[in-house]
Amino acid sequence: MKILRANAGALTNFEVLDFLRSRGAAKDPTRIIVPVAPSEFKVFEYLEQSAACCQTRESIKEFVEKCKKYNLAKAEILNIINIRPSSVVEIDPIVEENEKRLGDSVEELVEMVAEVFPPPPTKTELDEDKQEEIPDGQEMETS
């Protein structure tokens, strides 16, 4: 990945996650020789548990295109992508004066978010990923 313009704008959580993956960040505990700082691994682990882990570049582009009719600010679109609200109540703190600006289309926006972006992993799915089988048949949680 090559930086074309420094500080060109804010990044989505997906873009940060994609960048960390390209640098070698992974869930693999044998990550001995990778150029990723421990703080970057913490960010990677957090983003792997967020909605960003299920997103794609195509879904983000599709969402941005579909959002044009709502006349949302770039920061509002970015927050919707990062947070992936699943109800009208979650849209309220993201979109300023949403009732006045969006009216009845708030519900339509929430439905579009659910349609374009896959749901984030649930707590139980994340816990299952952390479980590993040990020889005597017992399960042990890894950190």
Image: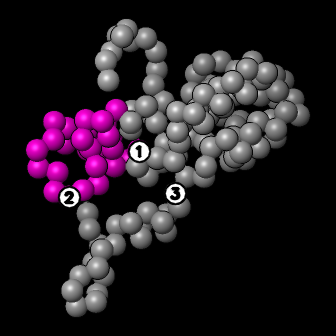
Magenta stretch contains residue 113: no
Image location of residue 5, percent across then percent down: 37, 8
Residue 67, quarter of the rendered image: top right
Which residue is found at the position 67% from the left and 41% from the top? 116
* Amino acid residing under circle 1: Leu
For the N terminus, give its image quadrant. Answer: top left
Which mark is on residue 29? Answer: 2
Which residue is found at the position 34% from the left and 32% from the top? 19
Which mark is on residue 79? Answer: none
Magenta stretch contains residue 38: yes
Which residue is found at the position 25% from the left and 35% from the top? 23
Q: Which residue is mark 3?
A: 121
* Amino acid residing under circle 3: Pro
* Whether residue 96 can be seen here: no
Contact between labelled residues 1 and 3, with CB atoms less than 8 Å apart: no
Image location of residue 81, percent across then percent down: 58, 34
SS category of the residue bearing label 2: loop
Tell me the CA gap for discs 3 and 1.
11 Å
Tell me the CA gap for discs 3 and 2.
21 Å
Residue 47, quarter of the rendered image: top left
Q: Which residue is mark 1?
A: 47
Magenta range is 19-47
Nearer-N-terminus badge (3/1): 1
- Residue furthest out toward the left: 33
Q: Is residue 70 left or right of residue 94?
A: right
SS category of the residue bearing label 3: loop
